[in-house]
Amino acid sequence: MKIALIAHDKKKDDMVDFVKRYKDIFQDHQLFATGTTGGLITEIVGLKVHRFLSGPLGGDQQIGGKVAEGDMDFVIFLRDSLTSQPHEPDISALLRICDVHCVPLATNLASAEVFIKALRSHKDSE
């Protein structure tokens, strides 16, 4: 699967910890991320990640384009809902395009964990 990983600044540590915890699952998939998040995952976790621009510079929209083209299977976007984001219209557009194209979207650790455990279960049943 092609999995996109996005995290607001206050959620980047959570994303890195999450990917580290489920590295055995993520290593079997193609990973994509916005710039800073992808850099942290590569540096700290050691996984290969295709990096787009950072979110505020258009990375969210680049991932949205992949979703619209049918070239992204799953998006994990750990959002900081308590802090105003200057690129909120881009974020809303990404959420909308995932809904329009029926691409699974996890916006918090609990929902991300449900999806990842489903991937693990699928892997174990093969």
Image: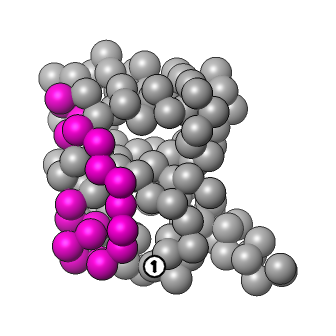
Residue type at the position of mark 1: Lys
Instruction: Decide: is 120 above or below 61.
Output: below
The residue lying toward the viewer, choosing from 67 and 102, is 67
113 falls in the magenta region: no
The residue lying toward the viewer, choosing from 82 and 119, is 119
What range is drawn magenta here?
A: 39-57
The residue that label 1 is drawn on is 23
Residue 45 left/right relative to 32: left
Instruction: Decide: is 93 above or below 6.
Output: above
Q: Please report the residue visible at 28 percent of the width from the left and 67 percent of the height from the top.
A: 41
Q: Please report the residue visible at 67 percent of the width from the left and 75 percent of the height from the top.
A: 120
Which residue in the rendered view is the most extreme toward the top?
89
Q: Position of residue 28 (x, y in %)?
A: 57, 73
Helix, strand or loop status at disc 1: helix
Q: Position of residue 47 (x, y in %)?
A: 36, 73
Question: Is residue 61 visible in this depiction of the protein?
Answer: yes
> In which image quadrant can residue 62 be found?
top left
Which residue in the rendered view is the most extreme toward the right?
125
Question: Is residue 7 visible in this depiction of the protein?
Answer: no
The residue lying toward the viewer, choosing from 13 and 56, is 56
